[in-house]
Structures are given as C-alpha cells and as structure tokens.
Amino acid sequence: MTTPEMPRRIARRRFLQSAAGAGAALAYTPTVFHGASAAEEPDPINVAVLGAGSQGKLLSLVARRIPGIKFKAVCDIWGAYNLKWLSRRLQQYGHPVTPYIDYEEMLTQEDDLDAVLIATPDCWHARHTIASLEAGLHVYCETPMSNTIQDARRMVETAQSTGRLLQIGNQRRSNPRYRFCYETLLKKVGLLGQITAGHSQWNRSVQPPMGWPKRCAIDEAILNQYGYESMHQHRNWRWYRKLGGGPLACAAIQQMDACNWFLDARPKSVQATGCDQYYRKEGYEQHDTVMAIYEYETSQGPVHLSYQMLNTNSSFEHFESLMGTNGTLVMSAMSHLGEVYREHRIPHADWQKWIAKGYLESPTALKANERDIALPMYIVRETPPPFLVKSLPYKIPVQTDGHPCRAHLENFFHAVRGNAQLNCPAEIGYETAVTVLKINEAIETGRKLSFRPEDFVA
Amino acid sequence: MKTSESTHRLNRRRFLQSAAGTGAALAFAPMVSGAKANTGKQDVINVALIGAGEQGKVLMETTRRIPNVRFQAVCDIWPYNRKWVAGRLRAYRHGHAKYEDYREMLEKEKGLDAVLIASPDCWHAEHTVACLNAGLHVYCEKEMSNTLSGAAAMVRAARKTGKLLQIGHQRRSNPNYTFCRAKLLNEAKLLGRITSINGQWNRSVSAPLGCPKKMEIDEATLNRYGYESMQQLRNWRWYRKLGGGPIVDLGSHQIDIYNWFLNAHPTSVLASGRTNYYDKKTHEWYDTVMAIYEYETAQGPVSAYYQTISTNSGQGYFELFMGHEGTLLISERATRSRIYRETWVDEKKWDAWARKGYLGERIEEEKKKETAAESAALDVRDSVPPPAYRLPVVMDKRVHQPHLENFFDAIRGKAKLNCPGEVGYETAVTVLKVNEAAEAGRKLQFKPEDFTV
C-alpha cells in the first residue's frame, strides 16, 4: 500500500540516510550515552507513539530524553485517560503532540512522521506495524511482536517489502552489559567453559487486576470496535487468549531471546506445563504458572535450559543464567543482578588475568555473618557450592545507563539515521516468537515438541 | 526364612519392645538427642554395616557417636573399604569382623539387631530382604532400589517379618525440616497457598573415582557381584543396571520432600535428561536432568521443578517452596535456609509469628542501587524483593544422625519410623519415573494406586 503521504515523508527525510541500505555496511556501533551537546544536536526524528499504556509511557518518557527525538503524535483508544495523560506530559516537555484515538486517522493526518513506537496489546501489533511500515514509517514494536506466528511472519514480510526498519523491543540485545557479556566474556574469553545448562525465570507476586477510574471508562461501543468485551478485559488484556500471548510471552520472549543470542543457537525441542487456576476468579484465561524445558544443540555441545514464570510468588525475581563447566553467568535487566561465579575447581589465579584486563571486578568479601558454618563432614558426592565457599561472585564491570530500554531505542534511532544496524530486526524477533509461543502448544499436547531449523525463518 | 539365629536373636531382644507392634500407638516423638539417663547395658543395639564405601563410612562415623549402638561387623566386597572401616571401628573400640559375603556374615554373626545398608542401589533389595528374613531391622540407604519390583519386595519383606525398615531419606528426621513442615506450613501456614516448587542439586565437573594401585578386586569376584570392571564398581552410580544416575542419587532426597511437605503425590511428570558433557561409555545415565511435576493438593494445583546438573555447581542444593504469601528456602545445609515474606503481606502478621518463635531474626535486605530502584519504579513488571527471615531452629548434628537415632529409637519402641519402607516406595515411584519420562519425551501420568505396594 502506497499512500499519497509516503513520497512527502521520504522527501522530508532526504537528509536521513536510507538506513536499510547503508546500515548493512556499518560495523556495530556501541551505544552512545547521553553525550550530544546542543551544538551537535542530531537531525530530528519525528516520532509517534501508538499505545499509551504503561509500556508506551515508559518508552516515550525514556525516548524523549534522547537528543533529536521529537514526538508529534500520541494514539490510544482510551481518550479520557492514557491518551490525555501522555499527550499532556509530552506537551509539558515541549513536544507538539496531537492526540488520536484512531491509528489510521493518525497515519493519514500526520504527514511528517519518521517513526512510530508501538506499545499496544499484542493482538494489535501486526495491524499497527504493517500499517505504519506501509505508510513509509520505521517501526519500533514492543515485544512480543505478535501473539500469533502468522501475524509475526506478516510483519517480517512487510518490513522486507517496504524496506523500512522494524526493531522488535527485545531490549537486552542493546543493553551494554548484555553486549559486554556476550562479546567479551562468552565469545572472546570463553569464561564459562563448555555451557551445559541454564535457568531463566520471571517471578512476580500476586497482583490484583488493573482497575480504572469509573468516570474515565471507555464506552462499550468503542471497546467492542477494538476487540475488547469490557473495560476489565481491556485493562487486563494480557490475561485473555485472543488479545495477547499472556504474561508468559511478555516475560519469556525477552529472556529466551537473550538465551538464543548468548548460545548462538535456537532450541531443538521444548516441553512445558502450565497452570491457570489461581486467577480464574478474575476471569483470566492465560496460564499464571509456566515451567518449560528446552533442549539445544550448540556448536559446543548439548545444552538444557529451563524457564519458569510465576505470578503468585516473586522469589528471586527475574534473571537469566547460563552454567558452564568453568563458571556461571547470571544476568538480569535489573542492574543489581548480574554476576559471574567461578567454579570451585578453577584456580582463582586463572581468573585474575581477566580482572587485570578489566573484564571482571573482584568478588566482594562476605560479611562475617554470611560465612557458612563448615559442617563436620560433607555428605557424599557433594562439591561445595560456589556461593558459600571461595567462589564469591565476580562483578561485571559494565553498567546499564538509564532505563534498560534506552540503549535499544537509541540503536533504533541510530539505525533510522543510517548510523547503525538494528540489534533486533524483525527476523530475530520472529525467531524468538517461534521459540516462546511453542510453549503454549507444548502445554496443550503434554509432549516434547521439536523445532526444525526452517521453523525459525519467516 | 527362619534360621536358628533369628530365633536366638528374637530371644536376645525380648527386652526390646517390638517396635512394629507398639510404635504405631506412639505419637510422633521429637528427636531424642543422644544422652539418655538410663544407659543400662541391655539397651545396646548391635549393628552391622553392609557396604563400606563413601556413604557407608558416613553412616558408620555418625552411628558410632550415638550412645548404646555397637558395631559388630562390616561387609564389603572390596577389601580396601572393609579394612578401612574395620580399622576405624577397632580404633573406636567397636566390633570389627570383616566379611566379603553378606550371607556369610548373616550366618556367622550372633546377636545382631540391625543392619545398615549402603551398598549400590542394585543390591539394596537383595541385602534388605535377606536381613529382614534373618530377623534384623534394616536401615537402607536411598534409593531403596533401582527397580520398583525390588522396592516392592523390600516393603513386603518388612511387612511379612514385622521387622523395621527405615529408608535413608534423612531429611525426614532433620529438625529443620520437621519444624518447617509442622510449624510453618501446617500450623502457621506462612506461605499461604503453595503454587510452585523449585529444587536442585548442582555439582561441578568431577573426575571418575579411581582405585589405589594394587587394590583392584580380581575380575572373577567383580563379575560374580555384577560389575564388569573396577571402574564400574567405583562409579556404579552412572551405570544403568547398577544405579539410577544423579536424579536418583540426589533428586530422590529432595523430591521426597516435595511429596512430604505437600502431603501429596504428583499426578504427572515430564523430563529431559541427556549427557551433555561426559563420555556416554562411562556415564550411561544423564549428567543433566530437568523435570517438572504437577501435583493436585488440597489447596490447589502445584507445579514443581527439579534439576540436577553434574557439570556446574551454581547455587548448590536446596528446595524452594513458593506460596502466594511467602517462600521457604530450605537446604540440608542449614545456614542457607530462609523464609521470605511476599512484600504485599502485612509485616505485623509475620511479626506475630516471630514473637511466638516461629521465625528467626530478620535479615536486612540489601539496598538496591539507585538505578535499579528507578527502573523498577518505571517497569510495571518488576516487584520489590521480599524481606527475609532466618529459621529459628539450629541443627547441630551430622545430617544423618537424627534419622539414624529415629531408627534406633524405633527399634527400642520409643518412636515411629520417620521413613518406613512404604514412604520410601512412594518416593521411588515418584523419582524413577523421571528417567522413564525423559526416555518417552512426554508427560507421564501417575495413578494413586501406583504409590502403594
């Protein structure tokens, strides 16, 4: 679909290099932190945000601090609340935004947009992304890219056919700490030895349903028009099967994306169990508890990964860990988590050189009261666990600056300017969607489901 | 089998109450800690050890510290092991007769009351059944057998002979565990509704066990006892016909606690098991196992994850019970244990339990870095890490001691077994199914009748 607006937009952006063309030749550009003084203010990129819920607010409020980003429009079907709140907020920060209820109207009316940030419910991602790409805009779409593989495939195809950029919001791909761990600790140093296993999880406390101020409710006709049966369903869309991939997709896609990336592989099989009883009283349909086991074949050998998502208990929150014969890496988007453990059998001196090179920070000493009381005799076959004895965690010397999504947005805007390649283009988002959405199928069948290599290609 | 010895033994023990008979009437007796006022000589329990390998040595070293238990003999097919243990027993002034063949020992040793069995899993059934039939009480290490038919035969033999059969799931007698189950879970219900469990036992890469030079057993003897080589005898846990692999060696201890704490048996299991690192010729069983159980408890469904990894020791071993109001992290390594309150639960409610002595000291939570707090505030999906409390119970004994004490107290008719054969059988059914599920590549169902003999 070529709209009449499209040529105009392209003309306006003549100064922006065609990213899809030029970007390919560029090496990876490390993330640029705050930097850019007013004097070197980059060419402005005109942005709209589609979906002004909590994630849309987060993306906008982080993006508005990035130099050269100018918000022009906000679109959300909840006019009396989300739309109003975010429009006003952006206006306060000097962004001349126009509010829209309907995205088609926004795409027609706004004639100088360069890019759209999409943070609507999963079931809308494909329609919003495809319409935006076809209107000639670059798209940053929140993860999961879609709740169905078919829609995710259409998104990839449209990005390819329009030549526009489509970044999927798997933000760990741009996180400097994750990039450091991947490039330096895993690829360059091979710090963990042979990776044989891993565990990732996202555990949250019991949460009451999201409510809304009664006077601000959307009227039923509009709700129905956009696919929601009620305000309750709209506010808690993640829990309804036709609206999204569930809390599972929301959490697991980010994390399994990091695992695929770190392992340089995609899984061979998955098995899973799911439970949906705890929140049934709220009318929810999706699993609140999911446990899954993936099998990989990497170039180093076979790997097992377990994944867990709980919505009734927050134990150890969210992290991804990889376990190798020489050490363990624990990563999290939360910056207070993220450390490396040395296996006890590896001499301390072996890792001293990495500290000397600045790849690791020395373990901090345990407080006296944290020291384990040595039992008179280990029971048989035990090797002392590293966290208790000598192997205290080594710290990762790279910190994430600002919110973890900032670097990923910056990568997107750099790519729009032709200065970088996307860290998570649609093709990668698709691979991850395939990896995670299969969990639901595995729960249904109770069988180990296999992936074929071609499953990961849109 | 009624041997003349067994009659003789029964006479000798007329003063020892018949535990199987009277024990049932007794309420659960708290751990009796060693010293008793009445240490009359007639109270002495005479024991033998079958299997003097690593685990047998641990049981011996613990048992010899328990008053009024006296070793008489040790049996092991490897002279190196039995000499080592016999030498220690002599130094401790215990009896120290040595046997290669358990049948010879049962025939020759007079006055035995009980046997501790720590031979390889594939021998447990034969050793246990023979000892029970010889009129002896048996403490048998877990896994009670590597086959369900072997495990069932053990339960039946215990019933038929009326002798006691304690299975070595020693956490069942550990005061940390009994306290948590009785007080925190069943009485205070501190966790609220338990929805999920995690557990693991992760170990570093380790070299196969070797054999000191010139200490090898000759091949004919090895073959007679079912081993192809010294390497296989020393590393029997990794061989399919001899043991069950790490999931059975290690997982069994912990998955037993899942059943016990939940007061339920699982309804299904799925699993993945592979050999990711070691040579499959010397490590026939999986070095990496991940399994997921589903339970239906009185409170609702529970998903329970377990993993054992033999190539990385990350986070060691623990069981983590997760409920909607709190979390119990428990480990045989007692200093690890913690109780976490979910942040939304009223602090006052838990303070009241702390005042009653149900919770130990509150652990100051680590302050998050500012950036993390900021991102948490922005990111709707984060929740704040929960406040942690210590367990108020101190377990100052070796990990096997309370379970052995429970066994000896039961022989004296002063306690009920904390892990009788029937319970060991339930756990064997639960755990052995993991290997079957890994093979099948699908979720396998349990029927309630699967758990009974």
Image (tube, coloured by chain):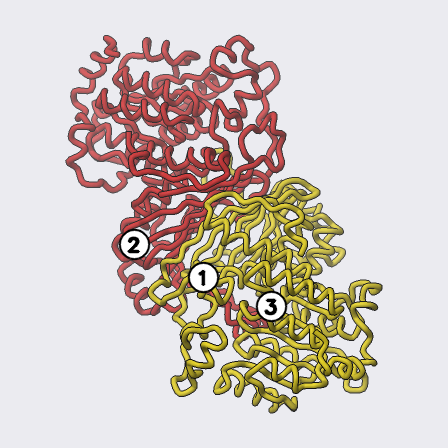
Which quadrant of the figure has residue A325?
Answer: top right
Circle 3 residue: A126
Q: Position of residue A292 (x, y in %)?
A: 50, 50
Q: CA distance from mark 3 to mark 2?
A: 40 Å
Nearer the observer, B156 or A430? A430
User: Quick check: can you spot residue A16?
Assistant: yes
Local crowd size for mark 1, using a 10 Å CA cut-off: few (<14), some (14–19), many (≥20): many
Mark 2 touching mark 1, by CB under 8 A? Answer: no
Q: CA gap, disc 2 to disc 1?
A: 19 Å
Chain B as rendered: colour: red
Counting from the top left corner in percent of width and height, residue B176 is at: 35, 47
Q: Earlier in the sequence, mark 3 or mark 1?
A: 3
Work out which quarter of the rendered image holds the N terminus of chain A and state it: bottom right
Q: In the picture shown, does residue B361 fall above or below A142? A: above
Alpha carbon separation for disc pair 3 and 1: 32 Å
Secondary structure, mark 3, is: helix
Residue ID at (44%, 53%): A274
**Nearest the eye: A435 or B28:** A435
Q: In the rendered image, which residue does mark 1 sit on? A: A314
Rendering coords of residue B46 (x, y %): 29, 21
Residue A224: mark:
none
Q: Colour of chain A?
A: yellow
Badge 2 amino acid: Gln
Give the residue at x 37% y 18%. B126
